Amino acid sequence: YETVKKAYNISTVYKITGSGDVTAELVNYLDKNCKDLSERAMIYFPSGNYEIKDDNNLVLHSKVCIVGEKDTVVKMTGSNNSMLRTRKDEKVADVLIYGGTWNGDSKGKHIFEFNAATGVEIKNITLENAKTNGVMISEGSECTMENVVVKKSGNNGVQVTAKSTANIKNTTISENGKFGIGVDSESSGFEDDDITKLESIITICELLSQRR
């Protein structure tokens, strides 16, 4: 995490200290310490195995960085919601999710869900076993994915709705129930630059046609 801390000039770090179910600790940091931030703050998951479940306040706010190590694993244990999400009315900006593995365990909705969120970055991370989509980018959100593995989602690896933007770089999307990347029929597809921009190579999957 020191690399991320330095690269993003982060001075405030909140460390997850529990084990097993850490929902309450994560929500406490998000709800009490990471609202209305004037500069970036990090919530750090050290190496280890963690569990989270649904909580109404398990939502991301502007300038929050969620950072794990390569061998950090966070697993969903039960939910009607996504593992991490933003609220549309909050119009979140400047979010980073970095490192580790997030396992949806076929519960809840998506692993990450962004609603009207801009400046979102997902880097060096594995997302697996989402019940629906690995990443849901909607309501005009703007998301960059770099060095990401998305696999074994029940529906699509990445779902992009109309007026949203996904910049996808060096990312592997495979073994998903339907498509690697889905674009809503309401959108005008890839011809409109404000829908989806693709940079570099998406490996393993054949864009928009990879099926299990």
Image: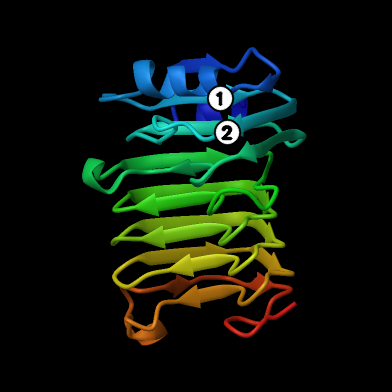
Say what secondary structure mark 2 lies in: strand
Q: Describe the colour scheme in one phrase.
A: rainbow
**Residue at image mark 2:** 53
Marks 1 and 2, how far apart in space? Answer: 6 Å
Q: Quadrant of residue 172?
A: bottom right
Residue at image location 37% in from the left, 43% down from the top:
86
Q: Which mark is on residue 23? A: 1
Q: Secondary structure at mark 1?
A: helix
Callout count: 2
The residue depicted at 44 percent of the width and 18 percent of the height is: 29
Residue at (40, 36) in percent of width and height: 60
Residue 80 position (above or below residue 204)? above
Q: Are marks 1 and 2 in contact (CB under 8 Å)?
A: yes
Horizontal side of residue 132 vs 48, given as left or right: left
For the C terminus, which image quadrant? bottom right
Q: Nearer the viewer, residue 116 or 81?
A: 81
Counting from the top left corner in percent of width and height, residue 184 is at 40, 77
Left or right of residue 120, residue 92 in this image: left
- Determine the image quadrant of residue 164: bottom left
Binning the other alpha carbons within 10 Å of mark 2 as few (below 14), some (14 to 19) or many (20 upward) gives many
Q: Position of residue 35 (x, y in %)?
A: 30, 24
Residue found at the very far top of the displayed protein:
17
Can residue 99 be seen by looking at this rendering?
A: no
Q: Is residue 18 visible?
A: yes
Q: Which quadrant: the N terminus? A: top right
- Closer to us: 49 or 2: 49
Instruction: Describe residue 167's horizontal placement relative to residue 149 as left or right.
Output: left
Tell me the amino acid under the disc marked 2: Lys
- Residue 41: image x %, image y %? 42, 24
Farthest residue toward the left?
89
Q: Earlier in the sequence, mark 1 or mark 2?
A: 1
Within-10-Å neighbours for mark 1: few <14, some 14–19, many 20+? some
